[in-house]
Amino acid sequence: MTESAIVVKDLKKSYGDFIAVNEISFEVLSGEIFALLGANGAGKTTTLEILEGHRNRTSGDVTVLGYDPEKKDQNMSMRVGIVLQETGIEPYLKVEEVLKQFSGFYNNPRNITEVIEATGLKEQIKTPVRKLSGGQRRRVDVALGLIGDPDLIFLDEPTTGFDPSARRDAWSMISNLKSLGKTVILTTHYMDEAEYLSDRIALMVHGKIERMGTTRELINSESNTTIEFSLSDTNKLLPEAITKIAEINGNLVSIITNSPTGILGELTHWAIENSLELDDLAVRRSSLEDLFLKVVGSEDSAR
């Protein structure tokens, strides 16, 4: 049975009348990549800061690697790596020098050569930090999070500001952390990043966890399919049953349905009978981003 690296039960954090985290509960299993998603102000950062031991909770129970982070036990600190959105690194030091400096902070640091290999920094070890690209700097940040050989790593918005190529490289590096046996807590605003990297995802809205599960479980919970096409001849009336559920904007027709096969069958039969082409026909299952926007939107409208 897989152990839990993190256990959170009824966690609450309030500032006067404002509730930043509202009695959330979840577990993170050892060796998994767990993503915490949410809009700005959803409570992600506060939750992470409590888990990291940088902020005290108002109520609830939290254990990280078996420790209460609020007690700031040094044994826990030695087993946790934290990669913040921005880190202060001496820009004139070379990559190798920075890693040597930080390795001295730990009792049993990881071999520097292994860390360089794991983070893809082999060609930059003699390069001053100030001369690195944004993506390379982020690799150094992750290397510093790994140098203490932690069991658990917090990654806060690891690819913000990256170009598409750099993001893909970072994804490969983060996936490699799992192969090293690390547990990873990830926050990100990129839904495709969460889908690609995460074993499980928790979606936070206004301090609460509204949905949690694997990507497949979350997407399947919203089993809608979107069918879109363009009509060159708008004088031809759609079948009545389809007209009732379609959104028509000029020539563009959009249908959201739980029964795509039946709708497509009726549409194609109608188009053939009327000698029409369904131009730009596209069929798309709901995505994680669709779910995110729906949940966030529904919560905002309920307030």
Image: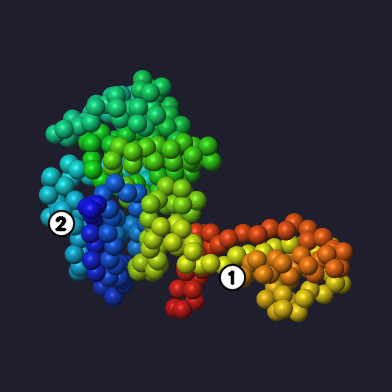
* Rendered position, 159 above or below 44: above
Give residue 279's quadrant in the image: bottom right
* Residue at (38% x, 41% y) in the render: 174
Where is residue 137? Give x, y as percent.
40, 34
Name the quadrant of the C terminus: bottom left
Where is residue 247? Give x, y as percent.
70, 72
Pick whichever, 294 or 161, lies toward us. 294
Pick whichever, 136 or 267, lies toward us. 267
Q: Is residue 98 visible?
A: no
Q: Amino acid at mark 1?
A: Asn
In front: mark 1 or mark 2? 1
Where is residue 293? Give x, y as percent.
51, 65
Q: Quick one: SS at disc 1?
A: loop
The answer to whether mark 1 and mark 2 are in CB contact below 8 A is no
Q: Residues within 10 Å of mark 2 (few under 14, many from 20)?
A: some
Q: Is residue 18 visible?
A: yes
The image's mark for residue 69 is none
* Residue at (24% x, 27% y) in the render: 111
* Residue at (23% x, 53% y) in the render: 1
Mark 1 / mark 2, whichever is N-terminal: 2
The residue pinned by badge 2 equals 68
* Residue at (49% x, 64% y) in the render: 220
Q: In the displayed structure, does residue 116 sit left or right of residue 266? A: left
Where is residue 108? Give x, y as percent.
16, 33
Q: In the displayed structure, does residue 232 sit left or right of residue 281? A: right
Whole-number angstrom distance, CA of label 1 to CA of label 2: 45 Å
Q: How many marks?
A: 2
The residue pinned by badge 1 equals 258
Give residue 151's quadrant in the image: top left
Q: Amino acid at mark 2?
A: Asp
